[in-house]
Every structure is written in structure tokens, then in C-alpha cells.
Image: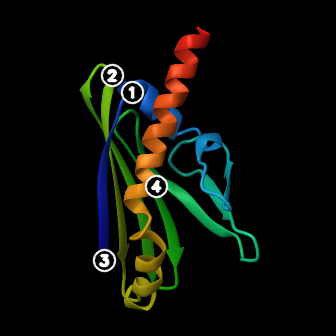
Amino acid sequence: MQLEHSIEAQVGLEFAWKYRTDIANWNDPPARFVLDGPFIAGSRGTTVLPGQEPLHWSIREVGPFTTFVLEIQLDKALLTFEWRFDALSEQRTRMTQKIVLSGDNAAAYAEQVEAAFRPSLADGMRRIATEMAAAETRSTNAG
């Protein structure tokens, strides 16, 4: 199973990368995100949702300014979130998020993953691009 969406943000590539790889900017209430260590391959993180067991994930891959991959190990399945960043101009970046569910037991999780991510993927990425552009405007005006 695979879901994918791209959005263009009115920010430069370097700003987009730095903003998205700073988990303090991961704003998805009521979820809270914690990263144990720097944003590098091998670091582990946790997503905390009220009333649910913490969800543990790891950073599998980081290609600075181009891509990062987060993964969640499930029972005989793997859920990955791949983010790609492409500079379209000095002040415009395309961000693509691809969510992939794979493995021998992927079918057991497909309905849950579909329900959790398909309805909100496009809106969530639009919100990230909007917040990112506003943050860049604030930093430019403050500087």
C-alpha cells in the first residue's frame, strides 16, 4: 500500500529542510513528537497521543536537503514515511511525502493506515507549507 502527495512551498530549499527536520515544528495536535538525539539516521523518536500507547519510530535515512525516511516497525510489517525536497527556484520548494506499508503482515494494517492518513495527507501538507512560509517571513522580518 502506498500514499503520496506533493506540495509547493513558497520557501527556499535550505529553509524548507531546516524547518521540516526540526521536530519542534511538527505541529499535529493532539500528537506530540519526541526525538532522542539529533536528526540523523539511526536516531529514535516517539509519537505520543492521548489515551494511546506511545508509537516508536526511527530515522532510517537522511540525505541532507534532499530526503529523509522515518520508519515504524509493526508486527511483520513496516510503515515508512519518505520526505523528498526539490528546489524549484530560490524561493520555491516542492515537498513530497510518500507513505508505504509493506511486509508479510501489511494487510492486517492497511485499513488502519488508510483511514489514518489518506483523508488528511493533502490538507496536512498544505498546512505545513503554509506554516513554513509564515515562519520564513517571520525570520526574514526579524533579521
- Amino acid of disc 1: Val
Q: Position of residue 132 (x, y in %)?
A: 49, 34
Q: Position of residue 26 (x, y in %)?
A: 59, 47
Q: Is residue 51 above or below residue 121?
A: below
Q: CA distance from mark 4 to mark 3?
A: 19 Å
In the rendered structure, which amino acid carries the disc numbered 3? Met
Residue located 52% across and 38% down the image: 131
Report whether residue 124 is seen: yes
Q: Earlier in the sequence, mark 1 or mark 2?
A: 1
> Which residue, given by chain and number where applicable, does mark 3 sit on?
1
Q: Earlier in the sequence, mark 1 or mark 3?
A: 3
User: Which residue is identified by label 1?
Assistant: 11
- Of tags 1 and 3, which is closer to the observer? 1
Say the numbered circle drawn on residue 124.
Answer: 4
Between 62 and 133, the one nearer to me in the picture = 133
The answer to which of marks 1 and 4 sits earlier in the sequence is 1
Q: Nearer the viewer, residue 21 or 78?
A: 21
Q: Crowdedness of circle 4 by 10 Å Cα count: few (<14), some, many (20+)?
A: some
Q: Earlier in the sequence, mark 2 or mark 3?
A: 3
